[in-house]
Image (spheres, rainbow, N blue to C red):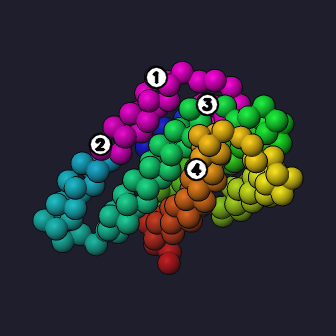
Amino acid sequence: MLELAARSLSELFAGFLQARDGATIGSIQDSIGQAFARLDAIAAEARHERITFLAAEPDPRPLLRTLLRLRHDLVMIGRAAAMPLPESFRPRLGPQLTWVAETAADYLRRSGEALAARRDLPPLDATEAALDGYAKAFAEIRREGLTLGLPVDTVERIFALGFALEQVRQNLRDLERCVREAAGRK
């Protein structure tokens, strides 16, 4: 699921810079949802086996909750990306969003690899820096008053994006904790 989410980020974030087909975004969301459903079923079976054999394995429920929240974050991002950002915002926010998508995709990929190998992963620093860069660029736009006079639905999507990115930050931190616990480190 993490690999699929990582591959999907650039496609989802591209909607902020150019018009995207809603069916494509819907298909991405469905694929991630199906991957989560498969993972949830596998985790339920593993829990049952763990109880049957009294095996001391990490509880997968915190990881599943975190992955579900990440999936919801991607749904929010997909909805916010239904239409491109205003033309005047793209040169300033576009590179920041591309940086967020690239670093978050890399982090998701590395997290999946670390979970599979039960090893710790490198810190979240690059993605945190990218998210901070976006927040700073958007704060500048707000300070300059560029959001004033925009249509209400555009402003709603822009602020929904900011909210979704903060949720991504929190949920990637939770993912980091879950990977650390799966690797046997607290």
User: First in sequence: mark 2 or mark 3?
Assistant: 2
Q: Nearer the viewer, mark 3 or mark 1?
A: 3
Badge 2: residue crowd in 10 Å (few <14, some 14–19, many ≥20): few
Spatial separation of the CA atoms under disc 3 and disc 4: 13 Å
Q: Is residue 78 left or right of residue 146?
A: left
- Pick the front one: 159 or 113: 159
Spatial separation of the CA atoms under disc 3 and disc 1: 13 Å
- Residue 146 percent coordinates (x, y): 81, 46
Spatial separation of the CA atoms under disc 2 and disc 3: 31 Å
Which three-letter amino acid code belongs to the residue tagged 2? Answer: Arg
Residue topped by disc 4? 160
Residue 55 in view (yes/no): yes
Q: Is residue 51 left or right of residue 95?
A: left
Residue topped by disc 1? 23
Instruction: Tell me which residue sits at (66%, 61%) in the image.
Output: 124
Which three-letter amino acid code belongs to the residue tagged 1? Answer: Ala
Residue at the bottom extreme, as displayed = 186
Badge 4: residue crowd in 10 Å (few <14, some 14–19, many ≥20): some
Instruction: Tell me which residue sits at (79%, 54%) in the image.
Output: 142
Magenta part of the chain: 10-37
Q: Secondary structure at mark 2?
A: helix
Q: Secondary structure at mark 1?
A: helix
In the rendered image of this protein, does residue 167 appear above or below residue 12? below
User: First in sequence: mark 4 or mark 2?
Assistant: 2
Asked if residue 49 is among those painted magenta in the image, a careful observer would answer no
